[in-house]
Amino acid sequence: MRVPVSWLKDYVDITIPVELLAERLTLAGLEVGSIEYLGVPQRHIEGVRWPESRHLVWDREKILLAAIREVKPHPNADRLVLAMVDYGGAELEQCVTGAPNLFDFKGQGPLEQPLWTAWAAEGAEVWDGHSDEPKRMILKEKPLRGIPNRSMVCSEKELGLSDSHEGVIVFFDQPCNQITGQPAAPGTPLQDVLGDIILEVGLTPNLARAYSIYGVAREVAALLGQPLRPPSYDVLMEGAPIEGQVFIEIRDPELNPRFTLALLRDMQIRPAPEWMQWRLMLVGQRPINNIVDVTNYITFEIGQPLHAFDYDKLVARAGGKPPTIITRLPEPGETLNTLDERTRQLEPHNILVCDTAGVLSLGGIIGGAETEIGDDTRNVLLEAANWNFINIRRTMQSQKVQTDAGLRFSRGVHPGQAERGLRRGIELMRRSAGGTVAQGILDAYPLPAPTVVVDLPVREIRRLLGLDFTAELAADILRGLQFEVQINGDTLRVTTPDHRLDIGDNIIGQADLIEEIARIYGYDRIPDTLIADEMPPQWTNVALVREERTRDVLVALGLREQISHRLIAPEREALLVPAGNGPLVQAGYVELANPLAADKTALRHTLLLNLLENARSNARYTARQQVFEIGSVYLKSDGQSLPDEPRRLGILLTGPRRVESWQHDEAAANMDFFDLKGVVEGLLNGLHITGAVYDRAEHPSLHPGRSASLSINGTPIGAFGELHPLVARAFDLPETPVLVAEFDLEALLDQVEDLHKTTALPTTPPVLQDIALVVGEETPAAAVEAAIWKAGGDLLRGVRLFDVYQGDPIPAGHKSLAYSLTYQALDRTLTDTEVAKVQQRIVKACERELSAKLRA
Amino acid sequence: MHQQLETLYAEALAELEGLTDGQAVRAWESRYLGAKGAVTLILRSIGQIPKEERAAFGKRANEIKEALAEAYAERETLVRQQELARDLEEGAVDVTLPGRTTATGGLHPATQTLRQLYAIWAEMGFQVYRSRDVETDETNFSLLNIPPHHPARDMWDTFYTTTPGVILRTHTSPGQIHAMRDLGQNGTQPIRVILPGMCYRYEQVTARSEMQFHQLEGLAIGRNIRMSDLKGTISAFARRMYGANAAVRYRASYFPFTEPSMEVDVECFLCGGKGCRVCKYAGWIEIAGAGMVHPIVLQNGGYDPTEWSGFAFGMGPERMTMNKHDINDIRYFWQNDLRFLEQF
């Protein structure tokens, strides 16, 4: 919300520099996002940081308030005039200008009512009105079509007030000097007249009461310890009594606790007073006419939205009789044409303002087109009502409409505000539109807001803030915020003022008040202490420690961690399964009711999709990829409202085994199944997990011949291997093999033992023997190795496969596996005889169990 | 035979003189002096020489063998020295050529920041407690003092699922409820935990905003926990995270589940508070939202708010990472472009 300081000053004296005030407001929860300067200089306050402003400062000697006394024709140009400017000097200054808004006054001779304007003398710095880019210029003497010219009357753009360069600034009413409060004389520095500072204040939802200039003034008064000057709610009522001229019927007090009306007759619709238009412009409103502008002005001034009806239109709808205003929920099928030129289908919860003929407006949010104020309106029925904020918010959301009125009502306006808003509105309308006000206001208030009284023991303040407050200090702070406070010993009895709804009862009310005390006192004045309370038992999150260990091992193996969007498209996951293959996951999806993007409609079932999609986009720049991801997948089963969220580990490798180098001697072979298996083995080693069993996998996304399942001590962990060629094609991946793994991380990490044993380092020499065995090509290497280990007994300490060979002279259908065996006894040096005996045993066992033959 | 021996001797010496590389010298040695070398063979064929000449021949042959061995040793040393000199002189490489790259792995930047946070909070007695991503509306909002349709809900744009009442958590705060109910033993035990996790918001993904992000929530519950403790704890955190001189400022703010509520700023660690692009010329960088746990939330967690109190805070690891590394586009985090990840 834009808060002009000139307006704020109507209600409170500002005793500190505005920059400091902005800081204080920010610290007190009214965050000032930016400070905009109109003509006045920025001040630099020690310890307060605001970005350097690049606005134009109006020279106090050279940019002045002036009165145009006469507009003369230009002797040589039809599209220029000569403005005769009284800037407080001895003589009138002649300015050549092409401002179209002065042409109406051309050739009228000396004006009875001068035109008040902003004037810049020779040498003054202004913005260049003709430049598209912001550009400053210094005024210089320059004849225009033969007439000397050295100064100028300014447009809003030239002064940095707006982008408007249509005409020069013109007021018909003599403006005020902000310093003296008196009418400003020609020659007054413009800074003192139009100079201003606008604070952009961000308001959190709890600050509904501050959603107006006066509301911010209350906070300022409390922060500065200054008295508050409320606007006047006095009204001159001279017309016939309102009773009998209009009726109110509230059908649902929960949704519409209060509804007030006033009637104004014989109004003249014209522009609002210039000061009001100026203020509306400063807060970002476009002036319309004196009736509509007053309703907007009150909304911004005290935060109570008003609505004005054309009374005669209501009478006509009532068949010439006094109208009855009814607030109610819609009947089936009802619609409303609103001021924003939309026909709205009304929903059952939308509270409406109606008359006996139908719907008039969407209560508290937006008026209907049919009874709006027009240029020919004579009699005005003014509404100030109160609405249930929850329902207003719901209606704004479902009707997709945002208005200044709706924004305020949706955050909660106190019903006490209605009457004040109505009275203030009536008086401002009467002053600018003439006419007479019916005596009395019609006030239907079926559900009065309760007066909230909270007993606050002073010790509670200490308990929650950690700082001693005297009852007097706490009471003073609350009184500064308009609370009524009685001190009863060590307890404050606090009565909430009738402009705020955010103070609860009992212990909640206490917390609410303690926050107010802390906020105004200043969070920075509350000390920093360390928790003195009992330290809870300390424990270790074992699952997290193991997960982080997993990350470390994979990083040590050269893999890079990725983290992906967990929202995916199920259609994309379906591409992971070639036609005819079984499903990847037996579970339902957690689907979004309101997805934002077509590729992010549900939570993932697998990490594979993220891995493949990332691999494809990275393939544009990087042939070699080694990545992993750890994160949840979301599996929903029937009848379950919340899904299971198991953690998974995904791995992807693709591209050359070695990083490409300028040394071509290192052939860049692509990674294959065994590179991935190496990573898997490395991971298990790093986690000290033993008992891994690899088997042929039946995984729908993997190559049936080059993939494996992993189980550990009988627990299935997952599968890994080369991506199925059809899947690779479906994801448009490069030709090089893509290796992927997906493991159940929790099952894997369950296999980690907190302690793992080491073996003592032997002091005896090892004996190395090689052995090459020829077996059928179907025989798994793991079976051969297992047989070797079994037959090797205690003396066999190491088995390392170093060659696999097929081809001449090995018979067809066979392969040769060559192992390097390490024999060692811990207590003695082995003799050749001992080693030969064991080796013989191994060969025999392999011959027997696997039909292996020792290769010569 | 004598003549043959002498000729061999002369030839061998002459040949040796001409050799300049170690391999040739060693080949010469095996050719003449090796087990099958010429000199060795001649000595072995001594049986063919008349008996009376044998002694003289043998003597001479041994002299020649020793002389050649000596010449060889000399030559070998010389050539070795020459080779070493040549290698030191000629074997230089262009040290500006790139090295052979070893593939290295690395942790995602978000993980790195999370770990830093875990470590700092662990030192202060806060343990990691994780809870689910898919939540009930009740836990994510209502139990945190955010009733249905309340305007405070405007603070969180929410992804709803097709199951009524089930949403993707918009913040890690529902974890407060889980932690209190799980660890509090019906409101009888103090708690100190941090709750990291992925959160989701119904927000278009742009350079400045993401639909998915980590949060790290903190929760301390006890019989005597005060706002001054919250300030002291967060200040201690800031000194650990941003340096011993980090200045911290506390601004009043609003969260429905804490009261009093605050935002925490740290003096910009890049410009020292003078104002720069990262702090948007404000001199301060927001690092956390925090506050005293609201009595309703304490109640919903099983605690009696007249006896128990607590504080909570929430931080954004990605924002922290962005500030630290001058990252201007939050989308980099989950795009997993290796060119980004490899910078960490």
Image (cartoon, helix red, strand yellow):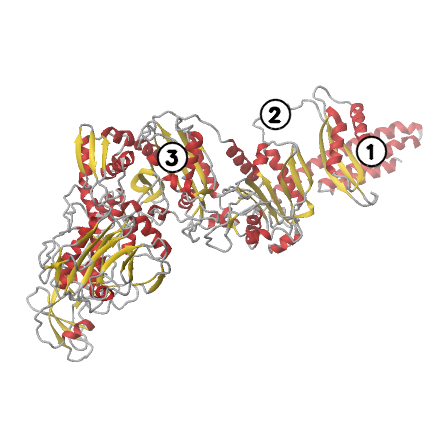
**SS at mark 1 in the image:** helix
Observer-nearest residue: A49 or B204? B204
Q: From the viewer's perspective, is A93 left or right of B38?
A: left
The C terminus of chain A is located in which quarter? Answer: top right
Of circles 3 and 1, which is in front? 3
Residue A847 numbered tag: 1
Q: On the image, numbered disc 3 is attached to which residue?
A: B300
**SS at mark 3 in the image:** helix
**Cα–Cα span, label 1 and label 2:** 34 Å
**Cα–Cα span, label 2 and label 3:** 47 Å
Q: State which chain disc 1 sits on.
A: A
**Cα–Cα span, label 3 and label 1:** 71 Å
Q: State which chain disc 3 sits on.
A: B
Q: Characterize the local packing of mark 3: few (<14), some (14-19) or many (20 or more) Cα atoms within 10 angstroms.
A: many
Mark closer to the chain start, 1 or 2:
2
Q: Residue at x 20, y 33 (%)?
A: A493
Q: Callout 2, which amino acid?
A: Lys
Query: Is residue A604 at least partly visible in the picture?
Result: yes
